[in-house]
Each structure stands twice: as structure tokens, then as C-alpha cells.
Amino acid sequence: MTQDWEPSATQRERDAYRRRRTSRSALIAATSTAVVLGVAITAIVSSPGWPRVQETYFDLDKALDSWPAVLSGLWLNIRVTILCAILIVTLSLTIAILRTLRGPVAFPLRLLGTVYVDTFRGLPLLLVLFLLGFGGPALNLSGLPNSALFWGCMALVLSYSAYVAEVFRAGIESVHQSQRLAGRSLGLTYGQTLRHVVLPQAWRRVLPPLMNDLVSLQKDSGLIAVLGVVDAIRAAQIETASDFNYTPYVVAGFLFICLTVPMARLTDWFARRQGFHGAGGMI
């Protein structure tokens, strides 16, 4: 019966109409994009200073020469991002759990978590980098390295944990109270209810915003260059200093975009799968 089924004439007409509408929309989008890009490119290349800008920022030979050094620095950014992301998730989840503890006996822990979040959300990340990057090694703490890379990573972890902890807390508190009560009525302890009932639901809800924070962390990992760490940005700065040609900065920006754009599209795709309609389309 299924193999003999054929769409009706009305259904075929509807399908044909939808295909025409889709083709028309794609043609309009392509045409408008080409017009906008054409106008923008024409305005830029026809400006009086374009020859100088082209020579200073878009020198192909300089880009090829600086590519290995900038790419090597980018590998450091990738490793910093991965390591910091693991530490940030661990620390921020702990802080979020502390802030959601019930009862007066847990007040000191809630207060500690609140002070931490308020402090590091109030401090600019660049300021935390300067304070820890230059002040941390001066402490000569036993068992801790004095490298600028270590203290730069610490600054990223401390700052981002304050924001991510609030994301986790929002996810935990979004789980309805009846879920906790159901877990406790089954004989689970508070910790077991949190682990087996609350956190799995909260994790699913906060994963899209967490991926957005990961995209931001990818970009902000380049801020450790202010401490002298030779990442992609610092490598571009070194290459630029030899002849004051700024093409290596363009190369570094291109490589960062190559990292962040796929992650951003993956975030949008996952958000739509989770029913976050505000994520919009692919572009």
C-alpha cells in the first residue's frame, strides 16, 4: 500500500510552490549579499589611503613569512583554552553548588561563593591579568610555578569561573522544586538528588550558554600576550616589530576566526536542537 502511494495533484502543486519560494529567497539573499559586499569593497579600495593600507596590512609575502610563527603561537592558545575550560567548569560548578545550598548552616559557604562571584565579575579581565601576572610570581609561593603563562591561565580561570558559576546556578535553580522532592521521597540523600536528578537536567539546559562562554574564552586566551607569553598575538607582534608591517596581525585574526566561527555555528546548531528558538538560523 505504501509503495503505491503517490501525492495528490494539490500536494504536488504545494511542493512546487515551496520549491519556487525557496529558490526565490535564496536568489534574493545571494543578490543582496553580493550588492552589499560589492559596495563595501568598492568603498574601501577606492579610498585615498587604500594603497598604503594594502601595503601595510595585506602583504602576501609578509603573511607567508609570519604564518609559521603565528600558527605556532595559536597552538599555545588552543592548549590554554582546553586546560582553562576544564578548570573553569570544575571550579564554577563547585561555586554554583555552594550558592544553592539550603539552610542557615550553609550560610558561610553561600557567602563565600557570592563574594567570589561579585569580586571577579566586577574586575575587568585585563586588570586581573596584570595583577596576577605581575604580582603572582613575586609571591614565590612554594609548589607553584612563577611563569607568566601559569598566572595568566589562573587569571582566565578565576574571571571566567565567576560568570560560568552564575550560568550553572541559573540552570540548577531552573529545575522545579518538585524534582528535588521526588528524589528525596525516593530515599535519595541531598547529594544523590543533586547528582542524579538536578544536575543532569541543569546541565542540559545550560550547555548552549556554556558553549558561548567557550567561544569567548577562545578569543580572550589571546589576552595572555600582555604578560609576554608568546601566543598567536604576541608572535604577530614580534613579526611586526621587524619592519612595522601589520600583516601578521591580520594573519592572527584570520586564524582566530577559523577557530571561533565553527564553534559559534556548533553552538547555534546545538541550541536549536535543544529548542532554543532565539538561536536563530545558521547565519
Image (cartoon, helix red, strand yellow):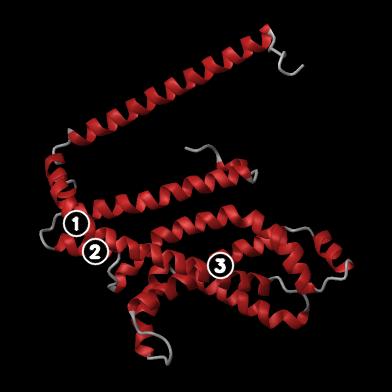
Q: What label does residue 37 carry, if any? A: none
Task: Estimate the x, y position of residue 32 in percent, counting from the top left.
Answer: 38, 25
Spatial separation of the CA atoms under disc 3 and disc 2: 29 Å
Q: Quadrant of residue 162?
A: bottom right
Instruction: Tell me the kind of residue under disc 2.
Output: Ala
Q: What label does residue 235 carry, if any? A: 2
Instruction: Tell me the kind of residue under disc 1.
Output: Ser
Estimate how packed mark 1 is, as few (under 14), some (14 to 19) or many (20 or more) residues with alpha carbons within 10 Å: many
Spatial separation of the CA atoms under disc 2 and disc 1: 8 Å
Q: Are marks 2 and 1 in contact (CB under 8 Å)?
A: yes
Asked if residue 123 shows in the view, the reply is: no
- Residues 124 and 215: in front is 215
| As drawn, 141 above or below 253 | below
State the residue position of label 1. Answer: 66
Quadrant location of the N terminus in the rendered image: top right
Disc on the earlier residue, 3 or 2: 3
